[in-house]
Structures are given as C-alpha cells and as structure tokens.
Image (cartoon, rainbow, N blue to C red):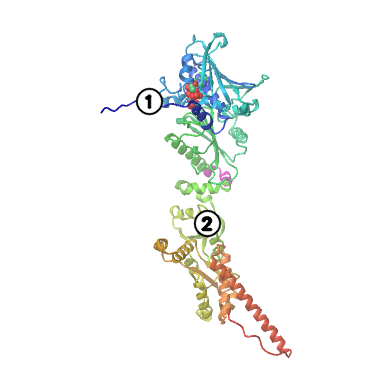
C-alpha cells in the first residue's frame, strides 16, 4: 500500500507577526527612532564602501509627519522587494541574505542591523511607513516609493528622477493619535540625543519652524585636553550630565581587539553589592542599552561605564548584549583594568584610596575574597570591627598573633568587652565577607592563627575562682545547673571584667541550630523525625558564665533557700539572654516571666517580714504568715 505524502509551507499570519515584532519585542515605543537612525547609519556605511567620499548626513524632521533622511546607499526597486518587503530579510548579512556564521560575523563588523525586522518597530507609533529612495549602487535606477502598512500590505511605485536628485533614503511616518507622545518635536530631539549622541556622522534634528540642532558630538574620551587635570574635569562633567553624579575618579577603558573605548566612573557613594549598575553601551556610536549590567563582573558594582564598541553583539531586541565568549572576554579584560586602577591607587595615591575604601569597602571585600593578589595588596587598608576598635587586620594581627572571629554581630557585641578585658583579640565576623576574609589572613601573614570564637575558648581565658569560693557557691550552683540545664546550657563560675557584668551567655548560631534541630526531631514522628534525627550530631551546649567579681553574684552564691536560688538563677540567665539579643524561644520567655514574678514575690515577702518586725517591736501580735514555696 503506497502512502500519500503532501508537502506544505508554514502559513504566516502577517498581522500577528507584525504586531508581535513591532509591539512585543521592544521594551518601549521609543526604540522606533533608534531603528530609523540605525538604518540610516548602516546605509551610509554601505555607501561609503562604494564611494568613500560620499556625504554622511542624517536629518530628522519633526512636524505633522516625522521623516528621517540619509545620504546612504539607497534602494532600487528590486532591493525594495527583496529587503524592505520581506520580513526577516536583511541586506546586511550576505548577498544572498544567508544566515551562515561567517556572513553574520562579517556583517556584524560593519553594520549595526542584521535581523531584518527593525523597521517594523515604526508600526508602534504609525500605521503607515513610506520610504522614498534612490540607489547609489544603480545610479540610473528610478526613484522608488514603498508604502507599507501595519496590516502587512504594501504598494510600490516609481517616481521621476528629479523628485530625488541625490542617492539616499527618506523614511516618513504619519504618527497615529496614540503615537504622538513619542513623535513630538521635543521628545524626538531628546530621543535622538539619547540614542544618536555618539554617532560618527552629522545628525541634525529640525523642527517645523526650521530650527536645526546638531546632536552628534565627539565622544568625551576622544577629545583632546591641555592637561590630564583638564581631561579629568571634562570627563567628570560628562559623568554629571550623563549619570547625575560627580565621580570619585575616572578610569579610562580601551580594548582595541573589540574596538572598545570608554570610561568607568567611580561612584561617590556606597551602593548595595547586589545592585548591579547599568552601563551605557554604544554599538558603533548608537546607544544599545543604558542598563547593560552584563558588561562588567559582579564585583565591580562601584563604577558606572559609558563605552562604545564595534565588537559586541546585540540581542534581537537590541536592548541587551548577547552573552557569548567575546562578552566573557570583554568582561574579564575590563575587570582587570579596574583591578589595575586599584593597584595603581595603592601605590600612587593613598589619599584617594582611603576615600575609595571608606565608601566602597564592602565592594573591595567582596572582590578580595576571590582574588589573592588583591587581598594581599588591599588587606592593610581594609577596616574591621575588633576588640581594639575599628582597625585594619594587619594592625590587629601585630598585637594579636591568635585572632578569634565571631559568627554573628550579636555574639561580638556580647563577648567583645569581656574577651578584650581578658586579653583576647576578637574580630566581628558577623558582617558580610568579614569572617571569610579574616580566615584567609594566615595565608598571607605567616605566624598568625585564626579561629572561630567558641564558648570554650572564651571560658578558658577567664580566670577560675579560688576552690574555697567555688565550694561556698556549690549549693547555689547546683540549683542553677539544674534549672538552667534544661535549656541546654551549662553554668560555670569565673572571674572576669567588667565587674558590673553579672553573667555572660556564650552561645553561637550553629549550637542554636543544632538544638532547634534536636527539639524538632524529638517532637516529630515518622519519617521527618528520622531524617532530622539522622542529621543530629552531639548538640553543643551554651554556657552561662557567672562573674564572681560581681557583688550581686557573690551574694547569690550564698543563697541557701531553694525558691530564691531558683528565681535568682533564672533571672541571671534571663538577663544574659536578653543581652545576647537573640530571639527568645517560648520556654525562655516563660522562664523570664517566672523569674520576674518569683523575685517580685520574694521582694514583697521580705517587705511584709520587715513590716511585721516593726509592728512586733511596737507591741503587735503574731508573726509573719508562713511562706509558700513558689
Ligand atoms: N535608510 C535605509 N537605507 C537603505 N536601506 C534601508 C534603509 N532602511 C532599511 N533599509 C533596508 O531594509 C532592510 C530591512 O531593514 P530593517 O531595519 O527591518 O532590518 P535590518 O536593519 O537589516 O536588521 P535589524 O532588524 O537588525 O535592524 C535593511 O536590511 C536594508 O536593506
């Protein structure tokens, strides 16, 4: 049995396609002007390939209609059918419009366009586009007029030669009522400056009264200046007018292999490292994106750049850079350039380096974590919070061969004064990157040891009390260990400064997590409990260190009454807990409540005893009411 097979071609719903490409590919209607300017630039490039001395002018006229006229290569009637009237066909790839890699690569090095869809962007603001053109390649070809409509239909007619004596093209749009916002004269001028300010051709915007404004300007990095200082000033001015800030410094960028030049402006204020700066990237002069964050490595969030390049590829919407190996290489090379700039500052301009570090030390820390050379170079300048105040690690390591680093800011706040009094050197490792950096110190500074601060280390450095004092406190300590022990916390007696601190709670995040995990494993059942149980390690316990130098603790150590001893132990634990500033668990809140009420009860009981005693002395009857154990 023979099988019947038929062959078909995709049918395209032209309206849908035009709508998709014109309305949904781009982020804003304003790109229509960019596409028109870009076609004009490409046409001039093509003409100059034929006639190197041909004029290179682009004129944008505003008014009832908007026209863009260029002195480019123009189109013959045949070209119009081939390129203008076929969506996806572009004269900028190869003679046969092919899409093979080499054709695209060679077109890319010369032209900005390549996809054959850009003109459709005009349908966002107009229902009809008229193109009148005269070909420079075929001088005797007649002038041709093409009218394309948003529904996908078009007409072509030829016009007498005198209607357009010189080669080139005029594209005319009649804005739709809802498109006038983007075609108003002032808006067109603004858009032309935005997109075309760095174009290498003469670009003029003319209004209905005939006022002409030249918008192209020499890129600021190509201008000549009398002195390096004057150059810096001019670039700073460019930064103010482009980004609205005066830069801390300017770093010039130059990568000849990808035809890239530009400037990186160092931000004068700190920004969050997660906020990636938007850079202005021009492609052959035409602004591609003012939000291109992919140009630099993540760590370089302290600069904003303006660059012009010939070697990078745009995406089809032409609003971002295409992620390819070239972009990778450019990113790396620009990163190296910024690194060199930092090294240069360290060697030649410490004052500026200080200002930079004051503003951007977070950025530098982020960067130094992955970059040994930079770490080595910049570590002496980076500030850390330590028990000696805000000092550099290098300075700190000179007086503390063993450096302890906390895991959290709260831990540091609580332990630092006591550790400092005991002669320990502690760095606050609670801030982003700091703990990692401190741990890398021994790699670049031999003879230095770095350890995470744990309860045992601190307690080991606190003075033990006399055995007699320990013995005298034994009964109170026994009660305290019993009531505090249920919170997975040991109780020890030590002498430490400051005298005013009655107790210190040594605990760290990992220990707390471990305890939460064991609690959950205990509470749960079935599979979940098994999983948590299997994760369980020996749960580290926290430590409540009572200060024997503190008068209150000395008195507490002599308490023999169980009720008061319990309330006192719980109150001391509760106070240390509050000082540690970590969130309280339900059992801990209940403990605080109980301790407070217990102490209140004791205080009132003592008060009643006192009243009775006074009363008795004055001849009153009876003794104090028997007291209930709480
Ligand atoms: N001003 C112009 N002068 C000469 N030819 C033009 C002009 N504008 C458009 N064309 C022709 O029309 C074709 C299609 O233009 P369109 O803007 O749609 O795509 P493109 O520029 O080739 O590519 P892209 O979609 O990347 O912009 C171009 O390839 C070019 O041949």
Per the image, the residue denoted by label 2 is 430
Instruction: Return the mark for residue 8.
Output: 1
Residue nearest the viewer, comparing 145 with 414: 145
Q: In the displayed image of the protein, which residue is found farthest to the left?
A: 1
Across and down, in percent, residue 39 comes to 52, 23
Q: In the displayed image of the protein, which residue is found farthest to the right?
A: 618
Residue 509 shows in this picture = yes
Q: Quadrant of the C terminus?
A: bottom right
Q: Determine whether 18 is above or below 391 in the image.
A: above
Q: Quadrant of residue 611?
A: bottom right
Q: Determine whether 97 is above or below 339 in the image.
A: above
Q: Determine whether 374 is above or below 584 in the image.
A: above
Position of residue 210 in the picture relative to residue 80 (left or right): right
First reached walking from the N terminus: tag 1 or tag 2: 1
Label 2 secondary element: loop
Q: Quadrant of the N terminus?
A: top left
Across and down, in percent, residue 470 comes to 51, 78
Across and down, in percent, residue 308 comes to 52, 30
Q: Magenta segment, principal secondary structure?
A: helix
Q: How many marks?
A: 2
Q: Residues within 10 Å of mark 2 (few under 14, many from 20)?
A: some
* Residue at mark 1: C-beta within 8 A of ligand 1: no
Decide whether residue 354 is among the magenta residues: yes
Residue nearest the viewer, comparing 22 with 566: 22
Q: Residues within 10 Å of mark 1 (few under 14, many from 20)?
A: few
Magenta span covers which residues?
A: 345-356
């Amino acid at each position: 049995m023979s099988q019947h097979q038929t062959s078909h071609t995709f049918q395209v719903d032209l309206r849908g396609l035009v709508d998709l490409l014109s309305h949904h590919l781009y982020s804003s209607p304003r790109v229509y002007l960019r596409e028109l300017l870009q076609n004009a630039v490409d046409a001039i490039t093509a003409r100059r390939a034929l006639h190197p001395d041909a004029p290179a002018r682009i004129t944008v006229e505003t008014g009832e209609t908007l026209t863009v006229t260029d002195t480019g290569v123009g189109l013959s009637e045949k070209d119009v059918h081939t390129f203008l009237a076929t969506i996806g066909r572009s004269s900028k790839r190869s003679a046969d419009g092919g899409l093979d890699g080499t054709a695209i690569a060679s077109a890319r090095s010369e032209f900005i366009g390549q996809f054959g869809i850009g003109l459709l962007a005009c349908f966002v603001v107009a229902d009809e586009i008229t193109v009148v053109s005269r070909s420079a390649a075929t001088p005797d070809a007649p002038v041709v007029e093409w009218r394309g409509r948003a529904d996908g239909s078009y007409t072509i007619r030829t016009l007498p030669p005198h209607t357009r004596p010189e080669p080139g093209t005029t594209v005319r749009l009649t804005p739709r009522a809802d498109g006038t916002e983007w075609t108003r004269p002032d808006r067109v001028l603004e858009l032309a400056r935005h997109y075309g300010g760095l174009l290498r051709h003469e670009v003029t915007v003319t209004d209905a009264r005939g006022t002409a404004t030249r918008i192209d300007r020499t890129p600021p990095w190509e201008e000549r200046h009398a002195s390096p200082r004057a150059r810096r000033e001019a670039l700073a001015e460019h930064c103010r007018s482009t980004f609205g800030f005066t830069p801390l410094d300017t770093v010039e960028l130059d990568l000849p292999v990808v035809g890239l030049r530009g400037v990186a402006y160092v931000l004068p204020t700190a920004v969050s490292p997660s906020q990636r700066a938007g850079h202005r990237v021009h492609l052959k002069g035409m602004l591609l994106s003012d939000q291109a964050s992919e140009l630099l490595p993540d760590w370089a969030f302290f600069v904003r750049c303006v660059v012009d390049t010939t070697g990078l590829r745009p995406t089809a919407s032409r609003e971002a850079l295409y992620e390819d190996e070239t972009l990778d290489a450019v990113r790396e090379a620009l990163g190296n350039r910024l690194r060199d700039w930092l090294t240069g500052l360290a060697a030649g301009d410490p004052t500026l380096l200080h200002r930079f570090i004051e503003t951007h030390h977070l950025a530098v820390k982020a960067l130094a974590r992955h970059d040994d050379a930079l770490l080595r170079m910049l570590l002496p300048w980076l500030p850390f919070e330590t028990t000696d105040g805000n000092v550099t690690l290098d300075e700190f390591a000179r007086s503390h061969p063993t450096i302890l680093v906390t895991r959290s800011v709260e831990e540091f706040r609580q332990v630092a004064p006591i550790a400092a009094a005991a002669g320990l050197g502690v760095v606050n490792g609670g801030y982003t990157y700091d703990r990692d950096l401190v741990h890398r110190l021994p790699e670049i500074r031999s003879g230095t040891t770095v350890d995470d601060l744990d309860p045992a280390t601190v307690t080991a450095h606190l003075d033990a009390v006399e055995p007699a004092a320990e013995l005298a406190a034994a009964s109170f300590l026994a009660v305290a260990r019993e009531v505090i022990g249920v919170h997975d916390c040991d109780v020890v007696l030590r002498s430490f400064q400051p005298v005013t601190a009655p107790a210190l709670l040594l605990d760290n995040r990992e220990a707390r997590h471990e305890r939460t995990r064991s609690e959950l494993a205990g509470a749960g059942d079935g599979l979940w409990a098994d999983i948590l149980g299997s994760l369980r390690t020996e749960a580290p316990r926290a430590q409540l260190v009572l200060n024997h130098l503190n008068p209150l603790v000395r008195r507490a150590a002599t308490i023999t009454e169980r009720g008061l001893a319990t309330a006192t132990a719980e109150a001391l634990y509760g106070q240390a807990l509050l000082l540690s500033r970590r969130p309280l668990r339900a059992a801990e809140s209940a403990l605080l409540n109980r301790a407070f009420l217990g102490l209140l009860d004791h205080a009132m009981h003592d008060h009643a005893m006192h009243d009775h005693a006074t009363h008795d002395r004055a001849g009153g009857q009876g003794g104090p009411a028997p007291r209930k154990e709480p």
